[in-house]
Amino acid sequence: MRDPSWRKRDADGSLRVSAEDADALGLTDGGRARITTAAGAAEATIEISDAMLPGHASLPNGYGLDFVDSDGTVRVPGVAPNSLTSSDWRDAYAGTPWHKHVPARIEPAPLVAAAR
């Protein structure tokens, strides 16, 4: 897959939220959040954005794919939005899942204790 270091900005595909929602949910810019939908859950870095309206959140497409570093380490930068989208909730005519209107619970990610 494409080398994520090529991305000039937002190499990890941040979850964008409004300042109002970040404040209400206890999220911090650059912090981590857990996103849970009917289809699954994932963690993402938070970007507080003036472009987002309260009650809305956004994940960029094109992330969440395996990438093998030059040393052979497999990384998965960002979240694949499709992993959070249920194929049960889709357009009745075309059968296309609704990617832009996915109910989600967003909360601060639990802190992971450092390995000793």
Image: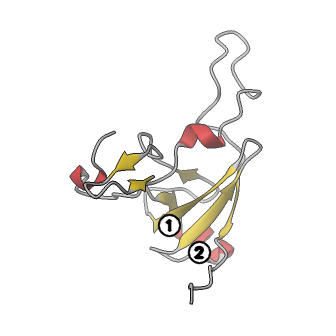
Q: CA distance from mark 1 to mark 2?
A: 7 Å
Q: Looking at the rendering, which quadrant does residue 66 occupy? A: top left
Give the structural element (helix, strand or loop) at label 1.
strand
- Circles 1 and 2, Cβ within 8 Å, touching? The answer is yes
Q: Which mark is residue 77?
A: none
Q: Is residue 91 left or right of residue 59?
A: right
Rendered location of residue 58, percent (x, y)? 52, 50
The vertical placement of 105 against 25, above or below, is above
Using a 10 Å C-alpha cutoff, classify the residue at mark 2 as few (fewer than 14 neighbours), some (14 to 19) or many (20 or more). Answer: many
Coloring basis for residues: secondary structure
Q: Residue at x 77, y 27 (%)?
A: 88
Q: Is residue 25 left or right of residue 7?
A: right
Residue under pointer 1: 46
Return the residue found at the far bottom: 116
Judge by depth and name the residue closer to the eye, 29 or 1: 1
Q: Residue at x 45, y 65 (%)?
A: 47
Judge by depth and name the residue closer to the eye, 99 or 110: 110
Q: Residue at x 49, y 58 (%)?
A: 16
The vertical placement of 39 against 106, above or below, is above
Rendered location of residue 8, percent (x, y)? 22, 56
Return the residue found at the far front: 72
Q: Is residue 2 left or right of residue 96?
A: left
Rendered location of residue 101, percent (x, y)? 65, 38
Residue under pointer 2: 27
